[in-house]
Image (spheres, grey):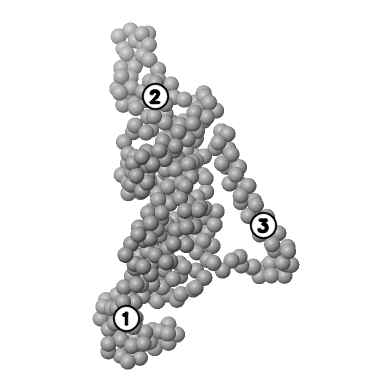
Amino acid sequence: MITRSSHRSTELYDCAERIFHLDGRKKLNLDMQVRWNFTYHMLGTTLFFKDVFIHLGSNYAPFKTFVPLEEELDKVRVIHDFLEFYQVTCMFSAVKHPISNLYFKGAWMVHHHLVEAANGPYEFLKEMIQPILSKFDKYWSQYNIYLSCAAILDPRYKVKFVEYCCCKFFGNDEGSRRVNDVLTALIGLYNDYKLQYVGVSPVVALPSPSSRLGTKNYFDDYDQFVSSSRYQVGKSQLDMYLDDDVLDLNCELDILEFWHQSSVRYPVLSKMARDLLTIPVSTVASESAFSIEGKTISASCSSLKSKTVQALVCMQDWHRAKTTLKIRRRLIMG
């Protein structure tokens, strides 16, 4: 192994910098069988130093046994490209406190990526994808209605983005049905919030005939104010928000700050957005999601009896499930 020999490692990184002008500070990663994110990083650094491996294998006998064959490198490239959805799973990681508006886009990207790879030309990859896709179909393929509503409350997405994703993946008829289900849930949820906060809706005043005092009109700029305002009589805050222009899909946006600033214009809708956006997308860190080694007992718990440890683990899972249920119940009941 190259990483186990300081001499070979030095030769590799020196050749990478001197001949191929690569960043020698980027090091090879070791694989860890119980964590596929380590495999992803290992394959990435292998491809990064691919030309260095080939060069050293052609010129130095000690390196020949470490140089992958061309067909092996092709498989490495295919598998690394497939594991690119690692980026989405990191985005969902609980340690980063992801906002729920990211859920629909991320879940759709992973779903599309899995199906595309399963229908691709690589037979060796299909065998690996099938159990992954079956688990995804079991837990994720039915996109959560309320988390999909959170995507609509992102001014970069709104209804058109959800419609685009659903129709592209499920076809026009099924896609339209799914979008209608999401819109129905969103409208019903908004109506519940409107009843709860009935006194905070914006009021559009009409000009009063007695606004003049003598020859001076203190409200001479009122018409300009009304024309610049997007409030329309007969339209709800949700309708006005959906009618507004969509922001650029790839622009950087602090979604919580957006709704904080929009609280004056959309007082009820902003409260609903606040509650929807605080739903956790995931309750586990990415390290746990990537690991198949099971629960790890820390040093402070190693002296506990097995039944006590099992009870503590069950209690923690129960507490997380209870917290999530409370949030969902609050959204449904208003």
Q: The residue under label 1 is which amino acid type?
A: Leu
Image point (30%, 17%), residue name: 220
- In space, the residues marked 3 and 2 are separated at their CA atoms by 49 Å
Tag of residue 235: 2
Tag of residue 314: 3
Dot 2: few (<14), some (14–19), or many (≥20) neighbours within 10 Å? few
Tag of residue 69: 1
Q: Can residue 23 be seen in this view?
A: no
Tell me residue 189's x, y (percent). 50, 33
Image quadrant in which you'd find residue 40: bottom left
Image point (65%, 55%), residue name: 316
Q: The residue under label 3 is which amino acid type?
A: Cys
Badge 3 marks a residue whose secondary structure is: helix
In this rendering, the answer to whether 49 lies above or below 260 is below
Image point (40%, 84%), residue name: 2
Question: Is the C-beta separation of discs 1 and 2 under 8 Å?
Answer: no
First-in-chain label (1 vs 3):
1
Image quadrant in which you'd find residue 72: bottom left
Tag of residue 253: none
First-in-chain label (1 vs 2):
1
